[in-house]
Image: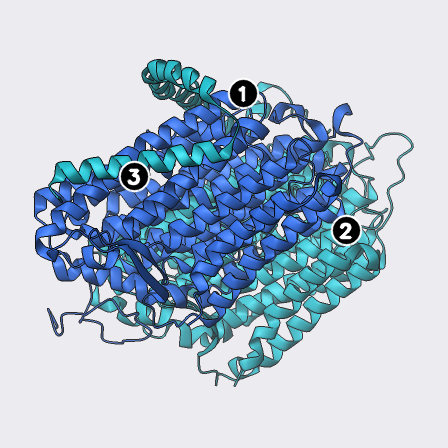
Amino acid sequence: MFPVLAFLVGLPVLAAIAIVLIPKSRSELLLPVAFGLSLLPLAVAGYMVWTFDTAGGFQWVESIIWMERLRIGWTVGVDGISLFLVALTAFLFPISILASAKISDRLRGYLVSLFILETGVLGVFIALDLVLFFVFFEIVLIPMFFMIGIWGSSNRKYAAIKFFVYTAFGSAFLLASIIALAVNAGPVLQTVSFQWNDLAQVPMTSAAQTWLFFGFAIAFAIKVPLFPLHTWLPDAHTEAPTAGSVLLAGVLLKMGTYGFIRFNLTLFPEATVKYGKWLALVAVIGIVYAALVATVQPDIKRLVAYSSVSHLGFIVLGTFALTLSSVQGGLIQMVNHGLSTGALFLLIGMIYERTHTRKIADYGGLASTMPIFSGFFLLAVFASIGLPGLNGFIGEFMVLIGSWQTFPVLTVVAASGVVLSAIYVLWAYERVFTGPPGKANKDLEDLNSREIAILVPIAVLIVFLGVYPKPVLDRMENDVNAVISRIEQSTNYERPTFDLEGRLTVDVGVPEQGESPSGEGSE
Amino acid sequence: MIDFIWLVIALPLFGAVGLLFFGKRIGEPNSGRIGSALVVLSFFIALVAALPAFAGTLEPENVLLFEWLPALGVNVSLLWDPLSAMMTLIVTGVGALIHIYGTGYMHGDSRFPRFFTYLNLFIASMLILVLGDSFATMFVGWELVGLSSYLLISFWFEKPSAAAAGKKAFIVNRIGDFGFLIGLMIIFATFGSLSYSTVFANANILETGGATVTAITLLLLVGAVGKSAQLPLSVWLPDAMEGPTPVSALIHAATMVTAGVYMIARSAALFSIAPVSSGVVATVGALTALFAAVVAIGQRDIKRVLAYSTISQLGYMFMAVGATAYVAGVFHLMTHAFFKALLFLGAGAVIHGMHGEQDMWKMGGLRKKMPITFVTMLVAWMAISGIPPFAGFWSKDEILAITYGKGGAWVVLWAIGIVTAGLTAFYMSRLMFLTFWGKPRWDDGLEPHESPRSMTLPLAVLAVFAAGAGLINTPFRLSLEHFLDPVFEVIKVAHPPEGSTPWILAGVSVLVALGGIAYAYRRYIKRALPVEEGPRWDFLEEGFGVDELYGRTIVLPGKAVAESAAFTADARGIDGLVNGVGGAVKKLADAATRLQTGQVRSYGTGMFLGTVALILWLLVRGGAF
């Protein structure tokens, strides 16, 4: 069988090599070639989405053990949980390259960084070997560090180092936990193994689960980031170049939320049931806190960065609420947030190229001078605050409805996010776009065709996923169910049933809620 | 057999999308004509689909369009029953008239096509709201009408006040939606479904007056209060008058703001077994009706009178559905849609003819300049004042009679309703007298004129309905009640008391209304015009300072909290800690900077080697070897 995933991850590496090989005299070819090459992984991802078997389970699995003794190797596969993160990654890179047309300084290195970054992120989402996962997880840091540190704005050095040190700090916990996990499972498996599949079979003591759960959780919580570990993100976002911000929000943060589902939920079910509420609590604090902080940010990019922290809180809440709707909602929210926030950062980049300011106070009246720009911005804004019909609603709604039964109080608090997000977003929109245009903004040019071309694919997906998310949800459903079922099998956790379960006199259109206790409390 | 009903939504949606992209090319007036034609078409399709309902043979039918959120069992699916049919006819019927009116009113506006894009979007959204067959689809429509409302209120966004009003409307509505959303969570946790069929068919399992159903209904009420601008969330509607007048007529009078009433009527199966919640609904309605009617008296701006009047009339509808008189509530919703749309469009014609003037104190004597507008508004004036046989009389009186008939504390609500009726007649007479009677008070050089045919025609049509629509549900002939029978079949719907009581009550309310008109006549016509200025009138005009109260108690403290979170807790507290801890790290990092070679290779190698070394070290320590 053709190694689809090795090919997928290898393509960006080959692209990076091709970029290096382009002679200096032909540097005008750099961008077009890079863009063309970046479409290849997208094509592969598209093929995968198209042919994915909705029955679920890992597909296109490749396993080559390099070190038999430690069972470390190239084990990769894609299931319903990672499929759309892979697709999102492959989708956002060509867009990021197009959005980098104004980069002139050391363009070659910039593009190479981008491709290495793509390899790293794709690797993270497909790795089923924990060492491999860790290596990819770390590879991502390096190009992003450079993107912020070299191609960033004025305070880039500080932001880059903060980003690097903060996440590397988390990685230390991750690495230690991975190794301890493998070592701990050694006696049962009769060998040390870093294979996700092996480790997922091994029952663990409560104590071991607790330690390892938190070890993984710290690394992922920094990556997401969860309150109060979030302060690296606004700095990184503000300083990063547009493509850096798009990719950071779009896919890098998802490495954390993905990690929670792939590792914490599956490997440490007991600890998940026991301590999940604490992560949900932190997530919900983050939803409200970051929304409040976003409201008064004077810098539009920082505002969007804080809104990211707020929105990602919903994902983590849903993940640990452990119902089909909540986890699935969280998962699709990862994709949706990547699209809407990605679009926002692209738009901010476009206006920054014109005005060289990110201060909200410097704008005003853009809706009359730049109607197309403001139309796209409004679409992205309403997608991000979860307007029905646009993609953001699907995830938020599923998370909220699904999480209530597990965490009623937390979910109510989280739901206040729908009010707060409307406040910070619409207030910002009002200040930037409405009113009479000031002197500085009178002669701004509206989006050109390249910029429109960048935004249209995202806009189409934003609407499509909001109206008809079924193709995505179908591909996720069985694997999400499997994750929750595993937890039910290995702990005393049971998915909540609804109050009138078994008592409904008229049974129409009731969704499956796992196995329902039959006849219980019937009248 | 009404599979084609999706067309009712699809046509205006198609219009919205088409005009969004090609509106500019199509231009004025064709974009307006296309937008209007699509809604007219929608109306006739709905009419055909509703024919069985008029014959009393309509079986409620669900039409599945596509699956949406399988995990929640939610599909995009429509419900065609007499209630949704009636709402659809109101929305598309009044909507079509207002579209046509808009082609005249918006003439010459630089974004004429965009206006019809948004109006079509609104019609489609509102139809999703009333046609969806689950709470989820209702919520979808609910939010989408909020979007259209936002876009249309701030249609003239260059004006800061218009932009602020749109934002305010959306945010205040979202406060209501917060409650709605929690209500949905509990509904799902209780019934395992959000679809009407499952929830309503099984509602009777819940204990009557129990905590669950009370909680659900109160939370739904929070949503309804936001959308229908009831106390304490009424503050957004007067500001919403910043939008073009056709918008005020369609969205902020006839249709969208009645969504709260529709929601409660639709959820009658739940509200009718939640007496506490129903009492709260009626009380909120009565207090809002009175409050807004009082405030309406103090308005100088003709549109703001009508805005407060709308809030007040919606209060009546809340009283009705709170009294479990769902048919009466929906009846008033319908008659109000006609006469209030008429009033707004009439006011729009006045403003149009006065070249943008909205202050009634700068009008006067317009009845000769604008005869058609004047005559049609006369009808609406009679209708809202509750003078028989105009439409408002029948619907308002049914509400009052039922409220009175419930006895006990409900009589207090009835009394509030009667007082409000008197105030209504008074403020509406004030509006009419100041605008159409007396001596001209407008600025020199202003030439008031009658509006073009595209505007007066809708006025005439609405006037017919404002005059006659009440006759579909009189004590002599309860057609509407029979029409809606299939919807409220199993629900206990309150009815007016038997015997002579309703007639006496009707007599009382007509007398009160005539009293209001007579007093206004004395005050504004018989004598020299009074001076309505000074701090007390200002206070009244500002709606008793509710806005300022919210500003001081919620907005400002909220902003202070946000600021201290952002600039103290986050910047200094959390990030300060991070930087503090990082102080040492930073030194290290600075040292590391000197090691920078700028070569990706060396970093990669270093990273990889470091990783491998660490792994080996831990493995050895872990005893793997």
Colour used to depict chain B in the structure image: cyan
Check disc 1 and report its element: helix, strand or loop. loop
**Measuring 18% from the left and 71% from the top, which residue is drawn there?**
A503
Identify the subunit bearing mark 2: B
Quarter containing the C terminus of chain B: top left
Under mark 1, the amino acid is: Asn
Q: Identify the disc placed on residue B374.
A: 2
Residue at mark 1 to residue at mark 2: CA–CA distance: 66 Å
| Residue B398 visible in this rendered orientation of the protein | no
Identify residue for label 3. B612
Under mark 2, the amino acid is: Phe
Colour used to depict chain A in the structure image: blue
Residue A419 location in percent, x, y? 44, 40
Check disc 3 and report its element: helix, strand or loop. helix
Residue at mark 1 to residue at mark 3: CA–CA distance: 33 Å
The answer to whether B591 is drawn above or below residue B116 in the figure is: above
Q: Residues within 10 Å of mark 1 (few under 14, many from 20)?
A: some
Residue B346 location in percent, x, y? 73, 50
Check disc 2 and report its element: helix, strand or loop. helix
